[in-house]
Image (cartoon, grey):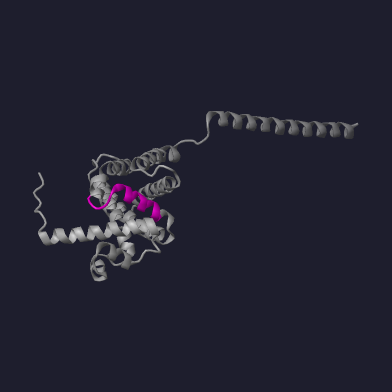
Amino acid sequence: MDTAPRPGLRERKKQRTRDALVRAALELFTTNGYERTTVDEIVETVDVSQRTFFRYFAGKEEAAFAVQEIAETHFLDAVRQRPPHEPPLDALRRAVLASWDTIGEAIEAVVPIELHMRTFQLIESTPALLAAHLRRHEGLEEELARMIAEREGVDVDTDPRPRVAVALFGGVMRLTGRAWGAGEDFSVAAMRELAASYLDQMGPALAANWHTDEEHGDEHAEREEGREERGEREESGEGAKMREKTVDEE
């Protein structure tokens, strides 16, 4: 049972104003473009002053990532909730998929989930936002690496494994985001399905031999053929030397 005290009227009003600014900003960014949207247009949509906007956000960039921050916090919470016996990469995989399954309610409290997904596309296709996203991602990876190190009982500053695991996981998720953005289905379900598919390839990509049995057979045959050719050349050379030696002796 949730026993947290209910926010007071003043706090609820402030939260509603912030949420309204976020929604207006994201609607304008995704419709008109991030660079072409001004703070004046955002505050005019919500009917508040610029001073009110800057009371909540340092600038447009912070507003653009407001919902993304909710998603990141939701994911970190999911990682903390994973059972301690799960290996790090398995825990990260299960946490991100679980967070995709449950993030809808948290995001819908601020903006429609469809708007959040359109904003994700915007971030991937806008150089200024993509650069900011990558900077933010570095901070998230560091926090995640320290979380994994604590979970596994190792020192993140002397043991490279937490950062290696998180770097691998982060790279797969970046690839997932690019593939999703280049596709035609921009739903949460499509993002989750891609994430699951790509994450499932981590183990085989690291441990398995990438060649098929047929390719192995072809390569083996080529190697055997090469050995036979070298043997024939060597035998031919030895035969010629023997013939020369016989002639000299005669």
Identified at 74% across, 30% down, the residue is: 232
Whether residue 155 is visible: no
Quadrant of the image containing the N terminus: top left
State the extent of the magenta-drawn residues as a range. 109-123
Q: How many marks?
A: 0
* In the rendered image, the vertical position of residue 180 relative to residue 5, given as above or below: above
Going 32% across and 47% down the picture, which residue do you hit?
A: 114
Residue 61 position within the rendered picture, expressed as x and y whole percent measured from the top left: 34, 63
Would you identify the image quadrant in which residue 199 lies? Answer: top left
Residue found at the far bottom of this picture:
51
Along the horizontal axis of the image, is 32 left or right of 49? Answer: right
Q: Position of residue 237 (x, y in %)?
A: 78, 34
- Asked if 103 appears above or below 29 in the picture, the reply is above
The front one of 24 and 98 is 24
**Residue 43 horizontal/vertical position (percent):** 28, 65
Q: Horizontal placement of 73 versus 36: left or right?
A: left
Q: Residue at x 35, y 66 (%)?
A: 38
The question of residue 220 being in magenta is answered with no
Q: Quick one: quadrant of the C terminus?
A: top right
Seen in the image, is 198 located left or right of residue 245? left
Q: Nearer the viewer, residue 189 or 145?
A: 189
42 vs 149, nearest the viewer: 42
**Picture coordinates of residue 191 (x, y %)?**
37, 43
Taking the magenta stretch, the answer to whether it contains residue 115 is yes
Q: Main secondary structure of the magenta part?
A: helix
The answer to whether one can see residue 193 in this image is: yes
